[in-house]
Image (cartoon, rainbow, N blue to C red):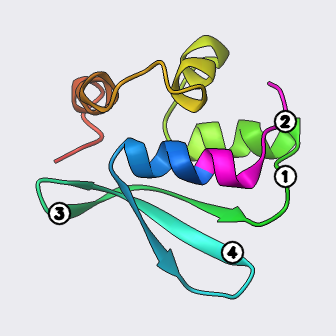
Amino acid sequence: MKARKSKDIQRVLQKQGFESFSEKDHHQLHYLVVDGKKQAVFTYVGKAPLSPELMETVSSQLKLTDEKMADSFFSGRLNSEKYIGMLRDKEILS
């Protein structure tokens, strides 16, 4: 998986329905919010660019099971309805 800028990741997360919660100065916690409820899908993103290894960790936290799906998510090609539908199909969302 290719490295990406932190701001790009945060922009995509917001577009997908994640809300950010500042817990520390250098990291933001992003939770998926569906129908006004915080879900058990979350990740931390700092200010520094994310290495390929960190991108794999973030993908795993976001329940993106394969690299192709993760690339679609992070490039903005996977819309939020499809992402949330995939999470519901896997019974990750309530």
- Considering every residue shown, the one lying at the far top of the view is 68
| Residue 49 percent across, percent down from the top left | 84, 52
Q: Which residues are magenta?
A: 1-9
Q: Dot 1: what SS?
A: loop
Kind of residue at disc 4: His
Mark 2 and mark 3: span between their CA atoms? Answer: 31 Å
Residue 17 sits above or below residue 70 on the image:
below
Mark 2 and mark 1: span between their CA atoms? Answer: 7 Å
Where does label 2 land, which residue?
Answer: 3
Q: Tell me the number on the disc at residue 27.
A: 4
Mark 1 and mark 3: span between their CA atoms? Answer: 29 Å
Where does label 3 land, which residue?
Answer: 37
Q: Tell me the number on the disc at residue 49.
A: 1
Dots 2, 1 in contact, CB < 8 A: yes
Kind of residue at disc 2: Ala
| Residue 72 percent across, percent down from the top left | 55, 18
Could you tell which of marks 4 and 2 lies nearer the N-terminus? 2
Other residues around mark 2 within 10 Å, as few (<14) / some (14–19) / many (≥20) = few
Q: Give the residue at x 43% y 21%.
A: 78
Could you tell which of marks 1 and 3 lies nearer the N-terminus? 3
Other residues around mark 4 within 10 Å, as few (<14) / some (14–19) / many (≥20) = some
Q: Is residue 2 magenta?
A: yes
| Residue 94 percent across, percent down from the top left | 16, 48
Q: Quadrant of residue 22?
A: bottom right
Residue 44 sits above or below residue 49 on the image:
below
Q: Tell me the number on the disc at residue 77.
A: none
Kind of residue at disc 1: Pro
Other residues around mark 3 within 10 Å, as few (<14) / some (14–19) / many (≥20) = few
Could you tell which of marks 1 and 4 lies nearer the N-terminus? 4
